[in-house]
Amino acid sequence: MKHVSRRQLRVFAAVVAEQSFSGAAKALHLTQPAVSLQVKGLERSCGLPLLDRSGRRIRPTEAGRAM
C-alpha cells in the first residue's frame, strides 16, 4: 500500500458516516470535488474500491469496512 494521509482517512470516514460525498463535504467544510479527490487517492493507494457507489447512498465495500 502506498502512503495514506490522515486527511484521506478523515474524509473517507466522513463519507461513510454521511453516506454521501456532498454530506461529507458539508460536514468538513470542503467542496464535493475535493472530497471525491481524497477518496479516489485513498482507493488508488489501497488498490481496491472502498465505497460502493451503485445506489443513492454510498456504502463501504468489504475493504472499506476493514479500513
Image: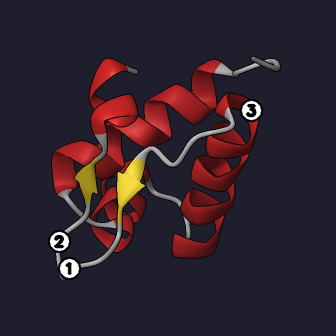
Which element type, helix, strand or loop, lies under badge 1? Answer: loop
Judging by the rendered image, the residue that carries numbered circle 1 is: 55
Q: Are marks 1 and 2 in contact (CB under 8 Å)?
A: yes
Say which mark, if any, is on residue 57: 2
Is 44 on the left or on the right of 43, as rendered? right
Looking at the image, residue 44 lies above or below residue 8: below
Q: Residue at x 46, y 30 (%)?
A: 10
Residue, far bottom: 56
Amino acid carrying label 2: it is Arg
Q: Residue at x 70, y 21 (%)?
A: 4
Viewer-nearest of discs 1 and 2:
1
Estimate the x, y position of residue 26 in percent, counting from the top left.
34, 64
Judging by the rendered image, the residue that carries numbered circle 3 is: 45
Structural crowding at the residue carrying mark 1, measured as other residues with C-alpha within 10 Å and reported as few (<14), some (14–19) or many (≥20): few
Which element type, helix, strand or loop, lies under badge 2? Answer: loop
The quadrant in which the N terminus is found is top right
Q: How is the image coloured?
A: secondary structure
Looking at the image, residue 28 lies above or below residue 56: above
Say which mark, if any, is on residue 18: none
Amino acid carrying label 1: it is Gly
Amino acid carrying label 3: it is Ser
Marks 3/2: CA distance?
A: 23 Å
Q: Quadrant of residue 44?
A: top right
- Mark closest to the chain's N terminus, 3 or 2: 3
